[in-house]
Amino acid sequence: MWGHHVHEAVVAAGRPESGCTVHFVNNEYDSGPIILQRKCPVLPDDTPDSLAARVFEQECIAYPEAIRLYANRSLFVKDGRVQIDSRLSENKKIKIKQFYTSLHNVAWGDIL
């Protein structure tokens, strides 16, 4: 299941939370090793559209974080599971944050 169908199913089932998953791609749909996940509450008055908007907010956090981890070569797969090597120096973290902030500003500037 994908896209809006997921949000419709979550609301219809009365689930307490939903979210997003970022994973590596393999030959099977949505079955690659998971890099990270983020969740959000499903509110009592949610519609599929309002839930989709809340999940999208989490995607806007998850995707850049997954890209950062990948770009830093901080991810590796062991026994089918993603492991994160968090041994980055503080100086490298600052430079990476500055790079992604600049990248984000350029991308949004081009859109607006």
Image: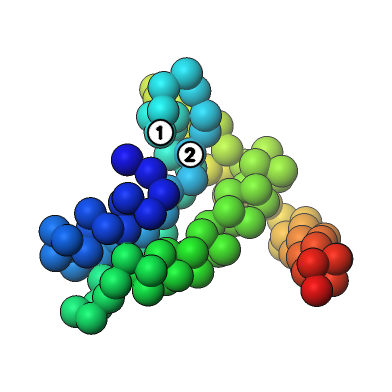
Label 2: few (<14), some (14–19) or many (≥20) C-alpha neighbours in 10 Å: some
Q: Is residue 59 above or below residue 87?
A: below
**Cα distance in 3D space between marks 2 and 1:** 8 Å
Residue identifier under label 2: 23
Counting from the top left corner in percent of width and height, residue 17 is at: 25, 65
Q: Residue at x 38, y 69 (%)?
A: 49
Marking on residue 30: 1
Give the secondary structure at mark 1: loop
User: With 53 as the anchor, is 111 left or right in this view?
Assistant: right
Please report contact status of discs 2 and 1: CB closer than 8 Å, yes or no: yes
Q: Residue at x 67, y 51 (%)?
A: 68
Q: Is residue 16 above or below residue 82?
A: below
Q: Is residue 74 above or below residue 93?
A: above
Q: Residue furthest left?
A: 13
Counting from the top left corner in percent of width and height, residue 10 is at: 23, 58
- Quick check: can you spot residue 83? no
* Amino acid at pointer 2: His
